[in-house]
Amino acid sequence: MPDKHELVLTRLVLDVLKPHKPGMVEFAQALTGLRGVTKVEVSIIEVDADTETVKLTVEGNNINFEQIANTVKQLGAAVHSVDQVTYSHPTKQQT
């Protein structure tokens, strides 16, 4: 098994419960601004009176899971589950 330091997180799919504010655009922009993140997709799964359940897909070069989770929390949301994780060997651009 490769040493964990030889692998980088390149894709993460999360089930997130968020308030209506910030909106999806602002939510995605805040996450896209994080180091290592190149793409963010937010899809609404369910809408309730005060909250939205969204599928959050984050792609990038050496994504920091803790930074993603902390930013989600700072935006008033909560990670309900980690639904998919992709690790790969780093390319020269990812190091």
Image (spheres, helix red, strand yellow):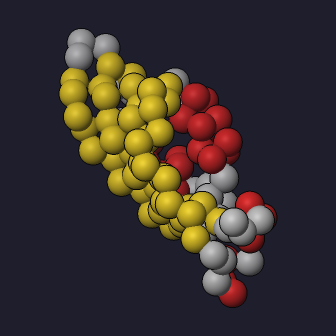
Give above or below for 63 relative to 61: above
Camera-nearest residue between 4 and 11: 4
| Residue 86 in view (yes/no) | yes
Which residue reaches farthest top? 49
Give above or below for 92 relative to 36: below
Quadrant in which the N terminus appears? bottom right
Horizontal side of residue 55 vs 13, given as left or right? left
Camera-nearest residue between 29 and 64: 64
Give above or below for 54 relative to 84: above
Quadrant in which the C terminus appears? bottom right
The x, y position of residue 52, in whole percent, is: 30, 26
The x, y position of residue 93, in whole percent, is: 66, 83
Horizontal side of residue 93 vs 12, given as left or right? right
Camera-nearest residue between 22 and 63: 63
Horizontal side of residue 3 vs 73, given as left or right? right
Horizontal side of residue 36 vs 3, given as left or right? left
Which residue reaches farthest bottom? 92
Query: Residue visible at 45% across and 27% down?
Result: 80
Query: Residue visible at 49% across and 53% down?
Result: 85
Give above or below for 41 relative to 71: below
The x, y position of residue 5, in whole percent, is: 78, 64
Query: Residue visible at 23% across and 17% down?
Result: 48
Which residue reaches farthest front? 1
| Residue 25 in view (yes/no) | no
Give the mark count. 0
Query: Residue visible at 39% across and 35% down?
Result: 15
